[in-house]
Every structure is written in C-alpha cells, then in structure tokens.
Image: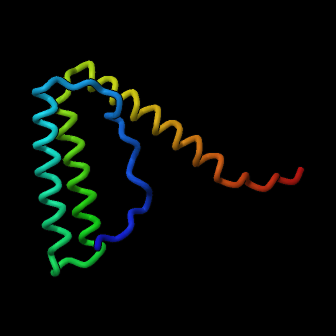
Amino acid sequence: MARPKKAARPTDDFAGLTYTAEQRAKIEQIQKDTKSRIDAVNKDEKLNADQKGAFIEGYERMERGQVFKVLTAEQQKEVREKAHARHLAEQEAQKKKQPLPPPTPK
C-alpha cells in the first residue's frame, strides 16, 4: 500500500466544468491510463512505500496536466483562476497558523 499523503488530495480545480463529448472521451482515456499506471505501481513489490507514493503523486500530477491540455482556452482560464484562489486561501490559512513573533522590548 502506498504511503499516506502529506495532505489531502488537492481540491478539484476542474469541478463544475462542462465538457463536450469529445473532451469527456479524452479525459476518460487519460484517467484510465493513469489508473493503470497507479495499479502497476501498487503491485510492484520492488518499490517501498515512499517510492510508490512518489510515483503515484507524479502520475496524478501528469494526469491533471494532460486533462488541462484537453480544455478550451476559456476552461483553462477558469481552472487557473480557481487554482490561484485556492493558493491564496492556503497562504492565508498558513499565515494564521504561524505564531506571532514576541514583541520587541522598547
């Protein structure tokens, strides 16, 4: 079994898009190919959990990139905007987690 991920799977920036039949078919093939690769990694007994996790993360990243290329320019813009908004929100959340430095004496 692959190692647990450092964080939950990233928010699906592709959610809410409406695909054409051709886009759906291409995306389904990309997902099928990715699943096949991930299944092969999970079955590979020569790899340790960290290696499996790294391969799986890489394949998932490749899948998102391939799906992105299937999108129209307008859909790509929408995905970029969602990803940018998510990154900003994550940065804000990170800032809130960091403790404030102690006040400097006057």
Q: Tell me, what colour scheme is on the image?
A: rainbow
Number of labelled discs?
0
In the image, residue 64 sits, relative to residue 77, either above or below, namely below
Q: Position of residue 25 (x, y in %)?
A: 11, 34
Which residue appears at 27% of the width and 26% of the height? 76
Which residue is located at x 16 percent, y 81 percent? 46
Q: Where residue 57 appears, x then y in whole percent? A: 28, 58
Q: Is residue 42 left or right of residue 90?
A: left
Q: Residue furthest front?
A: 21
* Lateral position of residue 96 relative to residue 28, left or right: right
Is 92 on the left or on the right of 13, as rendered?
A: right
Vertically, is 19 above or below 53? above
Say which residue appears at 31% left-offset and 34% top-offset.
Answer: 14
> Could you say which is closer to the camera, residue 45 or residue 91?
45
Q: Position of residue 93 (x, y in %)?
A: 59, 45
Q: Residue at point 36% right, 40% down?
A: 12
Find residue 81 and report its image quarter. Answer: top left
Horizontal side of residue 78 vs 27, given as left or right:
right
Quadrant location of residue 71? top left
Q: Nearer the viewer, residue 105 or 67?
A: 67
Q: Is residue 86 above or below residue 44?
A: above
Which quadrant does the N terminus fall into? bottom left
Vertical position of residue 50 compared to residue 58: above or below? below
Q: Give how far across and how far down residue 78 sits, in percent.
A: 34, 24
**Which residue sits furthest right?**
106
